[in-house]
Each structure stands twice: as C-alpha cells, then as structure tokens.
Image: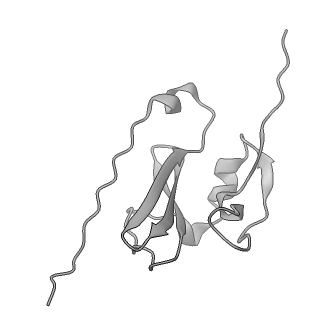
Amino acid sequence: MASFKLQTMSCPLASRELFQSPICRWTGTSQMVNGHLQEHTDLVLEPLQFEWPEIGQNKVFFSKVDHHIVTVAIKYQSENKFLCHASINDTELETLFYKYELELTTDYKGP
C-alpha cells in the first residue's frame, strides 16, 4: 500500500503577496484548513456581499458553497485593475471540476 504525505499549508491571511504583515500565522494540513477558516467568522460572508477594497488595498474573504469553504482574494494591481482569485479549500476530487462566476455590481448612481 502506497503512503502519502499530507500537504502542509498556511492560512490565506498569512500571504506575503497580499499583506505586508501576516494577519494569521496558522499552519496545518490540507484536511484541517476548512475547520480553521471557519474560525475567521468575521470574514465568512453569507450571503456573499462585500465592499470593494480601496485603491492600493488587498482583500481576502471566505464563503460557503455546499459544505466547502471558498477563498476569494482580491489583489490591487493598478488604479483601474484588481486581480481576483477564487479557490475551494478541499481535497475532494469533485472540487477540481467546480467553475467560478463572479458578478460585480455597484449601487453607485453617479452625480
């Protein structure tokens, strides 16, 4: 029987690419990450509605889809450009086939 090593990962809030200082220093196995992310209750958005980050700021939040936790990271690139990355934090094979759709809307009516 083949053995395998569980992947060690860090909380997305520790990303040096998104934050100058880590917000969370948790590390654990890929099987433990969903339980950890639910500890960030202020960042688990249900329903999934959020305020867009300010110019120069990055943002990370989480949402539940079925029994999975989805991580959404928004990274500032330039005044008119943000990159958005969504991923399901799960080890189930079915999550490899999920598709993401992000709809951006605004309540801004203009002057």
Residue lying at the far bottom in this picture: please name it: 111
Q: How many marks?
A: 0
Q: Quadrant of residue 98?
A: top left
With respect to residue 91, does 14 lie above or below? below
Q: Quadrant of residue 25?
A: bottom right
Left or right, residue 96 beside residue 1? left
- In percent of width and height, residue 73 lies at 52, 59
Q: Quadrant of residue 26?
A: bottom right
With respect to residue 16, does 108 lie above or below? below
Q: Which one is nearer the viewer's eye here, 41 or 109? A: 109
Say which residue appears at 37% left-offset and 67% top-offset. Answer: 49
With respect to residue 22, does 94 lie above or below? above
- In percent of width and height, residue 93 lies at 56, 26
Say which residue appears at 51% left-offset and 64% top-offset. Answer: 75
Say which residue appears at 59% left-offset and 44% top-offset. Answer: 89
Which coloring applies here? one colour
Q: Quadrant of the N terminus?
A: top right
Left or right, residue 85 beside residue 41? left
Q: Quadrant of the C terminus?
A: bottom left
- In percent of width and height, residue 34 lies at 64, 49
Left or right, residue 107 beside residue 38? left
Residue lying at the far top in this picture: please name it: 1
Say which residue appears at 62% left-offset and 65% top-offset. Answer: 18
Q: Which one is nearer the viewer's eye here, 81 or 19? A: 81
- In percent of width and height, residue 22 lies at 73, 69
With respect to residue 2, does 56 lie above or below? below
